[in-house]
Image: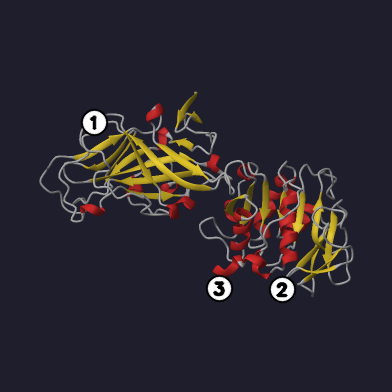
Amino acid sequence: MTRITSLLSMSLVVLISGMSVCFAGPGGDPIVLESIDDEDGFIRNDDFAYLDVIRLGDDGFARTYNSILSFDTTSLAGVTITSAEIELTRATAGSVWGENENEDPDGLGPTMDIKSGLFNDDADILLADFDAPADAEDCADVVNNDWGMTETALDEKLRIPIKPECLSFINTAGRTQFRLNSGMETDSDQALPPRESADAVDWHDGGNDDNSPKLIINANAGGGGVGEPSIYFVSAGTAAAPHESEGLLIDRLENVLGYSVNVVNQEAQNVADALTHDLIFVSESGSSGTTVPFMEEYRKSDVPFIMNELGGLTSALFGSDAFGAATSDIQNIKILDNNHFITENFSVGEIVEVRTSDVGIFVHINPGTSEATILAAANDGDDTQGAIVVMEVGDKFEDDVATTARVAFMFPHSTGVYLEDYTAAGVELIDRVFTWALGLEEPVDVPNPVDQQLWTFFE
């Protein structure tokens, strides 16, 4: 069942039971996801688990309740999250809990852990979820002795902000789970004390219409947020810990060119997720063999892609007659064709210094009998070795399969794009490869990191 509701400045939110598909409203209004009914619940200590309600606090024997909220966050792929919060709705009235014995009441507040995926790799509420390892801990950005919830009414709302440093752990390729705790100090790790009054409150779980738990996302629509071109960035790193060779490139794509970058570890590639983006980029930081199994679907899709890697990808894309070769000159390239947006600012035959470093490996590719175009070649006398190779829609691979989206090989196998090693000309060419692949052929008039010293954080 689909229902339409409004929340905050009349933003449009479409909620589908079991999986929320939500859209940002006008003016950058929040994206709102509803938790999954069958995956919400609570665990008491590690001896009792229960679905169908969220419970926080402790029981009459001071045994702690932890609760799990589960969200399908795949609809956030390509979104740059700037802030987020959890919203809960009370299922019981009255005070939250009685006298609190916390020695430092000013430090009391809800606690929140985040799992990028499922606790214990299982959607069911398990006893082991009580203290299972999380990917990010202490993520509730609030200090409030009682959360402002004493003597509260039924169905009153509570919002718990998520700390900025935890936002990257929201998983855009599957489930994200949140483990909540009241923040109360109890004796739950000791022998049962004399029975006292229970200090707990229940909150609605998923499947309760407007009262269901919600994950409320604010995105930066002006710098790689909702509505901006999204890049599925396949890497040896992760969103939380980018590969050392890619920090500057990711920063430039997001903050200079205004794209939304979704960094995905190569082992976590998912075709369905990749094809929701505007561009697929495979970095050299990973292993070509890991990506080869995905190439057949990538190359036959309507999503353009850029390869910074080759190895097994060369034959996977261009066929058995294609190959890569190392070159002795890893700093310069030769322009062969300037009748193209990427190379139009250079002259045919011009030798262009693209890298300032002579350290590393710089491999060029021969695209075989495909209809690919070599715009720039290795500076070693062999013009069949491409440094920048492109295929327009309709160009055919060796096996006669026509491309349905733009394809580019860009400085392949240069040990990742260490952007600080590139000259102004090299950075311009990289910018233009991305711009062309996305179909945004307008003059690239943006600051160059050579001028901005964007890589100073490496020093």
| Mark 2 residue crowding within 10 angstroms, few (<14) / some (14–19) / many (20+) | some
| Mark 3 residue crowding within 10 angstroms, few (<14) / some (14–19) / many (20+) | few
Residue under label 2? 356
State the count of labels: 3
User: Which quarter of the figure has residue 272?
Assistant: top right
143 or 230, which lies in front? 143
Circle 3 SS class: loop
Circle 1 SS class: loop
| Mark 1 residue crowding within 10 angstroms, few (<14) / some (14–19) / many (20+) | some
Q: Is residue 201 left or right of residue 449?
A: left
Looking at the image, is mark 1 or mark 3 earlier in the sequence? 1
The three-letter amino acid code for the residue at tag 3 is Glu
442 or 81, which lies in front? 442
Residue 147: mark: none
Looking at the image, is mark 2 or mark 3 earlier in the sequence? 2
Single out the mark in the foreground, 1 or 3: 3
Identify the coloring: secondary structure
290 or 205, which lies in front? 205
User: Which quarter of the figure has residue 377?
Assistant: bottom right
Q: Is residue 321 visible?
A: no
Q: Is residue 359 left or right of residue 385?
A: left
Image spot of residue 355 (x, y percent): 73, 70
Single out the mark in the foreground, 1 or 2: 2
19 or 163, which lies in front? 163
Q: Mark 1 to mark 2: distance in Å?
A: 67 Å
Residue under label 3? 459
The three-letter amino acid code for the residue at tag 2 is Thr
Residue under label 1? 93
Residue 5 to residue 272: above or below: above
Q: Mark 2 to mark 3: distance in Å?
A: 17 Å
Which residue appears at 83% of the width and 49% of the height?
397
